[in-house]
Image (tube, coloured by chain):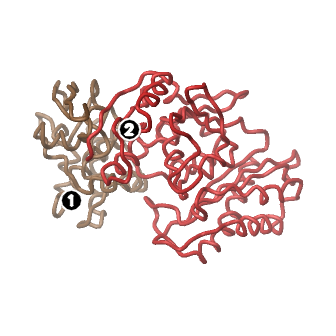
Chain colours: A brown, B red
Amino acid sequence: MMNRKIQVQAVINGEEVEFLCEPRQSLLEVLRETLGLTGTKEGCNNGNCGACNVILDGALVNACLVLAVEINGRTVTTIEGIATARGLHPLQEKFIAHAALQCGFCTPGFIVASKALLDQNPTPSENEVRQWLAGNLCRCTGYDRIVRAVMDAAQAQEDIS
Amino acid sequence: MQAFDYVSAGSVKEVVSLLASNNGRARLLSGGTDLLVQLRENRRTAELLIDVKNIPELFAIHYDSQSGLWLGAAASCHSICQDRFVLEHYPGLVDAIQLIGGVQIQYRASVGGNLCNASPAADSIPALIVHEAVCLIANQDGRREIPVEHFCTAPGKNAMESGEFLVAVKVPPSPANFGSHYLRFIPRNEMDIAVVGAGAAVTLDDTKRNVLSARIALGAVAPTPLFVEEAGAFLAGKEITPENLHEAAVIAQAAARPISDLRGTAEPRKHLCAVLTRRALEKAIERAKV
């Protein structure tokens, strides 16, 4: 029974998806290995680094700490769902413009986390950005460029709307 | 990760019967922020995970002025800290709960889980103790209650027996002229585990110059979160003076039995107990006066 596979239906990046998984498999594992969505990164695999951040029904979560069976009937946004047919999301554009990355491994997590922030707080203060991103680790940039990119993306969204 | 089966339970009754039929081999899953890490590292084992966060009683957060606050054991830290009644009536709880992890953890982790995990350094537990919170536990015979200060029995161990589980934490309504606060010392600004934590709650008289009653609890300075009843009792009936607050802090400090570990050594931890207790009291009093 413990190795039985369970059928899960969910909406991932706007598309209905169906897959089989074992109860012990994390959402991170299934995204990367079953569904081929490798933009979500495995960093620490214990909830410390934020590299695997996805948005689950509007909530920012670490995909390594969610079981894939838990997403049955729910909606997930990964880094692959951030850009639209019209082009990159303002956050992605500003990460490029500010060179807010070096090795880039943490970047999908940072962009997904920042998206979750701007979705609920379109005009965050610098302090709010830093607080919100405290659960995402970057060992290259020293964070300043990331924070500036997020602030600038918020401003850009504000200018459009 | 080790293999296990998974079921999402729909009611408290179903969980009780699943626990009985699996005789010690099942564990409850709420946010999973402790459990999944422990299973992955083989620090705990399970053959069945019972997901309890879809049971209405377990995700509910509700308040009324007579019975106080019901915190479903699986309610997320995020949802608790967004609740306007919690924000209004239980400031010390909010101080503590919002310190647990970053946003990603806040959205998943539950206060019930923080309690059941029974870490000596758990931030929510001293705050729950000073708010006189009570654990509501279900078992085959029905339900029983344990005050939070008696719930943790050793690092990672709690007072529940096989077949029992935590349904909710109930917090009584706050009286008039009440204030509370929790704070901790960590070497960083964010995202750390307490070196020492201190919670305080006070009820003042109508002149707001004297303490009617007080409760003080410490974290990370004993094998379990520590309720220092005598420190609060000392303040009862006393005037609010720097000397009296200092004395209460010294009593709390005397009760602490810190060890030296990778987060801090015993001597500075002992020192911190007095400093943090005094600061927790000062802030709680400031809030009680508003």
Residue at image location 11% in from the left, 33% down from the top: A85
Name the mark on residue A98.
1
Q: Residue furthest bottom?
A: B267
Specify whether residue B30 is in view: no
Read off the chain for label 1. Answer: A
Specify whether residue B192 is in view: yes
Query: Residue B228: horizontal and vertical position, in percent?
Result: 72, 58
Query: At numbered mark 1, what does the secondary structure look like: helix, strand or loop?
Result: loop
Q: Nearer the viewer, residue B24 or B219?
A: B24
Q: What residue type is disc 2 on?
A: Gln
* Among numbered discs 2 and 1, the one appearing first in the sequence: 1
Q: Label 2, label 1: how many angstroms apart (C-alpha)? A: 23 Å
Using a 10 Å C-alpha cutoff, classify the residue at mark 2 as few (fewer than 14 neighbours), some (14 to 19) or many (20 or more).
few
Res B254 → quadrant: bottom right
Do tag 2 and tag 1 residues touch (Cβ < 8 Å)? no
Read off the chain for label 2. Answer: A
Would you place residue A108 above or below residue B172 in this image? below
Res B26 → quadrant: top left
In the image: residue A147, left or right of residue B146 = left
Name the mark on residue A120.
2
Query: At numbered mark 2, what does the secondary structure look like: helix, strand or loop?
Result: helix
Asked if badge 2 and badge 1 are on a common chain, one would say yes
Using a 10 Å C-alpha cutoff, classify the residue at mark 1 as few (fewer than 14 neighbours), some (14 to 19) or many (20 or more).
some
Query: Residue B173: horizontal and vertical position, in percent?
Result: 71, 35
The mark total stands at: 2
Query: Residue A141: horizontal and vertical position, in percent?
Result: 25, 66
In the image: residue A104, left or right of residue A67 = left
Q: What residue type is disc 1 on?
A: His
